[in-house]
Image (cartoon, rainbow, N blue to C red):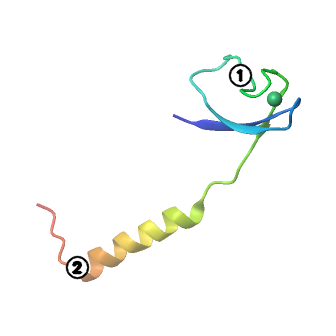
Amino acid sequence: MPTYTYRCGGCKKEFDVFVLGQGKKVKCPVCGSENLERVFKPFKIAGSEKSSKCSSCSSSSGGAKPT
Ligand SMILES: [Zn+2]
C-alpha cells in the first residue's frame, strides 16, 4: 500500500495518506482543507543497499544451504 505525503495549502501541515485508489478525495486531517499539494520524498536507498550487502556477505561466507 503506497503512502503519499501531502502538504496542506491552508495550514501548511504535512501528513501521510494511504492511497486506496485513484480519485479518492484527500482532506487535511488538521483543518479539513482539500487544497493539498503532493510532496515527493526520495526513497531510502541506503537501507536496501545495506540489506543486500548483508545477504550476499552471509551467503558467501556462511554455510546457508538451500534445502
Ligand atoms: Zn490543513
Q: Residue at x 85, y 38 (%)?
A: 12
Res 9 → quadrant: top right
Of the 4 image quadrants, the one containing the C terminus is: bottom left
In the picture, measured across the screen, residue 48 lies left or right of residue 21, that is: left
Amino acid under disc 2: Gly
Residue 41 x/y as whole percent = 71, 49
Marks 2, 1: nearer the viewer: 1
Percent across and percent down for residue 1 are 51, 34
**Label number found at residue 26:** 1
Outermost residue on the right side: it is: 10
Question: Residue 4's quadrant in the figure?
Answer: top right
**Which residue is at the far bottom?**
61
Q: Residue at x 78, y 20 (%)?
A: 32
Q: What is the crowding at mark 1: few (fewer than 14 residues within 10 Å), some, or many (at least 20)? A: some
Element on which disc 1 rests:
loop
Judge whether 67 appears above or below 58 on screen: above
Say above or below: 62 vs 34. Answer: below
CA gap, disc 2 and disc 1? 49 Å
Along the line of sight, the residue nearer the viewer: 61 or 4: 4
Local crowd size for mark 2, using a 10 Å CA cut-off: few (<14), some (14–19), many (≥20): few
Number of numbered markers: 2
**Cβ(mark 1) to ligand 1 < 8 Å?**
no
Residue receiving disc 2: 62
Q: Tell me which amino acid carries mark 1.
A: Val
Residue at 35% over, 70% down? 55
Residue at the left extreme of this rendering = 67
28, 3: nearer the viewer: 28
Q: Quadrant of ligand 1?
A: top right
Secondary structure beneath label 2: loop
What residue do we see at 68% from left, 16% from top? 23
Q: Label for residue 36?
A: none
